[in-house]
Image: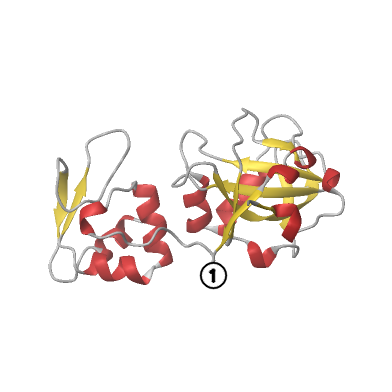
Amino acid sequence: MALALTDIWPIENPTLYKIHFARWNGSDQPLEVFVRSRQQWQAWQEYYPGRNDFNRPHIFSLVRFYHEPDIWMFGGIFDVLQRHPNRYEVKLSEVGREMIGRLKVRSSYRERTTRANFENHYPTLEVQEILREPYSGRRFPGYDDIDLSFEELEALVKNARPDWMAALKNAKGIYRKRSINHRVFRQRGPWQPVGYLHSMGVVPRFRQLF
């Protein structure tokens, strides 16, 4: 039986919140933005699209966890402090802070708007899992199964995940797929080599790129 978010996290007045379904905006995956920089992630809440979508005091932010269908990760509650003509001024709330990057919920949300009334979706959110630690990128899957974007790799390197750091230090080549998807790292396959490194591995080279 599914566990509803309302069962573990009662919110007294949902009408004071807008929910932000943050997803691919045509150039960035919000999940990688979240992993790479919390400051950049906050900027996603401050973006003003030309209409006052965040017209309530609080924002309940969800990040599209695009590796799994219909899964969203909790990105924090933000208080709207001011509404400027070209941006919002927000502050991360203390409410729910311990769940940021840990709580994953299920929602089949498919509508076009990314900023909706919270009360219409709060009762439908199902708890998928609560991670032991805040999400910092995918686990290293093994050399044969690496297939990721430059954006995701950048976030992994900047967060210095131990499993990825150990693997990258032992790698001697960098490969980039010649396509618009910017897939950049794989051990073998139809990929274009863009550089070879000595025994230090690829980590120093990637840090130079970033």
Look at 69% across and 37% down and name the residue there: 115
Tell me what residue is drawn at x 64 percent, y 63 percent: 99
Give percent across and percent down for residue 148: 32, 48
Question: Please, is residue 205 above or below residue 181 in the view?
Answer: below
Viewer-closest of 109 and 2:
2
For label 1, the crowd category at 10 Å Cα-Cα, with few meaning under 14, some 14 to 19 and many 20 or more, is few
- Where residue 94 sits in the image (x, y, percent)? 74, 65
**Please, what is the three-letter code of the amino acid marked with disc 1?**
Arg
User: From the viewer's perspective, is 172 left or right of 183?
Assistant: left
The residue closer to the viewer here, 9 or 42, is 9
Q: Badge 1 is on which residue?
A: 132
From the viewer's side, name the closer residue of 60 and 127.
127
Side of 67 relative to 198 (left or right) = right
Q: Is residue 198 above or below residue 108?
A: below
Furthest toward the front, the residue is: 1
Which residue is rendered at x = 47% and y = 62% of the image?
Answer: 136
SS for tag 1?
loop
